[in-house]
Amino acid sequence: MPTAVKEELLISPFLAFFIVHSIQLGVGILGFQRHIAEIAGYDGWISVLLAGITIHLVVWIMYQLLNDHQNDLMLIHENIFGKWIGKLFSFVFMIYFIFIALTVLRTYLEVIQVWLFPQLNMWTFSLIFLILAYYIVSSGFRVVAGICFLGVILPMGLLVTLLFPLQHGHFANLFPVLDHPFSAILGATKEMVLSYLGFEVLLIVYPFLKNPEKSRKWTHYGAAFTTFIYLVVTLVTYTFYSEGQLAQTIWPTLTLWKIVSFPFLERFEYIGISIWAIVVLPNICLALWGASRIGKVIFSIKQRTIALILLPIIYVSNNLLTSREAIDMVNSNFAKVSFYLIYCYIPILLILQWIVNKVRKKA
């Protein structure tokens, strides 16, 4: 059973904003526009909004679960399913966070290989990145939260670069609204979920928050800010590209950066990709921390040891994905599993908790 977290290890409730936003905003924002446009055309911006709204609903459900137990997912599983079955379900979430770290790292490495260094030694770069992530995770959750804070604040200036393509935008592209059937918009909403993944780490982070009930509004603010960023990027992209151009563009956000120019700087996309490492690092750190924290609780092994065991698993898996098709297959299948985990399992967990509480009160 999880023990109480020491006072000196707790973080302020407002940092939930940065934790949620930093893990939601990762490599997905570099290319999500094309995927939702393939399904819902330029009504895809509606899907971005709908997906964001559903995230708030899931966050509300998670807080109902967490506030009832005043602890984390592992304790919730144990209370509902018992010790051993509960550990099994927690182990599934451990694998889930491992896959988040894997997909984020591999997708970012692919961007670097395609745009910056085609001959990049992937084994070496991924090793350096994972060692850095391990160093941060092994330093404790307060350090991880600090990296999330920096990962939100430092790249914020990149929003200004959206003004450059906006100057060449054709706002008529956005009309007519609702030009596609609602089923297509819902399909694009489901596709959009992959870009919002990661906020479930709140189920593990909760005991590390001072007065965790007060973090609810900050979590919603973080999710809302993520939705706002995705919506702005979507609208700018749709006004800049025709549907035909967008269908042929793998990373629309990176291509938008190509038209950014200053008198003293060319090829801004190189700068943007480099800065994006500051965004990707908190993604990997939080996922690794979440997986290792679960491992610590269910296996009763030190978190640093678990993290050290997970590193070679992520490292080898990352380097086995050598083709674009393999990366897309992993991302696609992971998105499907994640969709049902978030929108089906978590609500079912709340219902089961309600039933268990009712039965125990009668007993």
Image: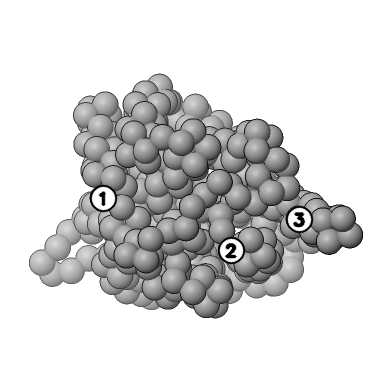
How far apart, in angstroms, are the residues tagged by discs 2 and 1?
Answer: 25 Å
* Tag 1 residue: 139
Image color mode: one colour
Q: Is residue 39 visible?
A: no
Q: Mark 2 or 1, which is nearer the eye?
A: 2
How far apart, in angstroms, are the residues tagged by discs 3 and 1?
Answer: 34 Å
Badge 2 local density, few (<14 within 10 Å), some, or many (20+)?
Answer: some
* First along the sequence among labels 3 and 1: 1
Q: In the figure, residue 40 lies in which quadrant?
A: bottom right
Would residue 360 be found to the left or right of residue 171 on screen?
Answer: right
* Tag 2 residue: 70
Q: Residue at x 40, y 47 (%)?
A: 289
Badge 3 local density, few (<14 within 10 Å), some, or many (20+)?
Answer: many
Q: Are marks 3 and 2 in contact (CB under 8 Å)?
A: no
- Residue 179 in percent (x, y) is at 74, 65
Q: Foreground: 325 or 145?
A: 145
Q: Amino acid at mark 2?
A: Gln
* First along the sequence among labels 3 and 2: 2
Q: Amino acid at mark 1?
A: Ser
* Tag 3 residue: 353
- Residue 151 in percent (x, y) is at 31, 61
- Residue 226 in percent (x, y) is at 49, 67
Task: State whether residue 20 is above or below residue 28.
Answer: below
* First along the sequence among labels 2 and 1: 2
Local secondary structure at mark 1:
loop
